[in-house]
Amino acid sequence: MTSILVAGVGNIFNGDDAFGVEVARQLSQVALPDGVRVIDFGIRGIDLTYALMDGYDAVILVDAAQRGHAPGVVSVVEPDPIEAGDSRPEDLALSPHELDPAKVLRLASALGGNCRRVLLVACEPLTLGGEEGVMGLSEPVTAAVAVAAETVEELIDGMMAA
């Protein structure tokens, strides 16, 4: 059986950065195949690192990411594999107040994690809240939540069929 972790990440106090959290919330209300876990990690990078050590066949990270698209555009990215030997000690330090997916992946690799496939379902943010922060998603990113949830479901179906 294929095991898949869907990890929603983001800070609910920084506007559109809460995108991954909202997608995880929506997916938690959907019947998904056995072997699929959906977890809202928020900004808990250490928890995500340990989850990546649990031997999943695939991980789908869901996060806001500035990729140069119009706000609300959802894209799927397959990051290059991260080798533990490529990391310096400062590349592995995690902040308790933010979750940097690239750092989490480097740390998990350095600790011996060997997830075969990692995908990022990303949404272009309109606002990340600035210095003051802001609660709630912008209109284009709110509309993208359903699109991203459907995209994740399609990715899961494809992985389960392979």
Image: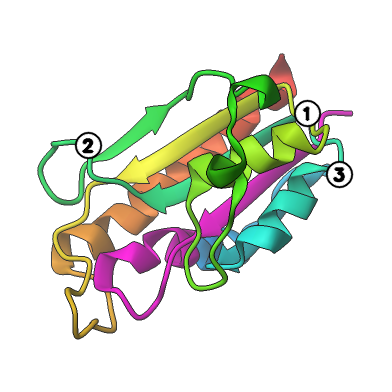
Tell me the amino acid under the disc marked 2. Answer: Arg
Q: Secondary structure at mark 3?
A: loop
Point out which mark residue 139 bears: none
109 in relation to 158, above or below: below
The vertical placement of 140 against 6, above or below, is: below
The amino acid on which the numbered mark 1 sits, given as a three-letter code, is Asp
The residue lying at 55 percent from left, 45 percent from top is 90
Q: Position of residue 35 (x, y in %)?
A: 83, 42
Q: Is residue 141 above or below residue 13?
A: above
| Residue mark closest to the camera, 3 vs 1 | 3
Front position among marks 1 and 2: 2
Badge 1 or badge 2: first in the primary sequence: 1
Q: Hey, which quadrant is residue 153 in on the image?
A: top right
Mark 2 lies on a secondary structure that is: loop
User: Is residue 44 one of those drawn in magenta?
Assistant: no
Residue 61 seen anywhere in this rendered image of the structure: no
Residue 107 sits in which quadrant? top right
- Start and end of the magenta stretch? 1-23
Please, what secondary structure does the residue beneath circle 1 have? loop
Number of residues whose C-alpha sits closer than 10 Å to that of mark 2, classed few (under 14), some (14–19) or many (20 or more):
some
Left/right of residue 4 with respect to residue 77 in the rendered view: right
Residue 74 image position (x, y, % from top left): 29, 40
Mark 3: amino acid: Asp
Residue under label 2:
67
The residue carrying mark 3 is: 54
Mark 3 neighbour class, 10 Å CA radius: few under 14, some 14 to 19, many 20 or more = few
**Would you call the spot at circle 1 few (<14 residues within 10 Å), some (14-19), or many (20 or more)?**
some
The residue singled out by tag 1 in the image is: 57
Q: Position of residue 149 (x, y in %)?
A: 46, 50
Q: CA separation, marks 3 and 2?
A: 30 Å
In this orientation, does residue 150 appear? yes
Q: Nearer the viewer, residue 76 or 34?
A: 76
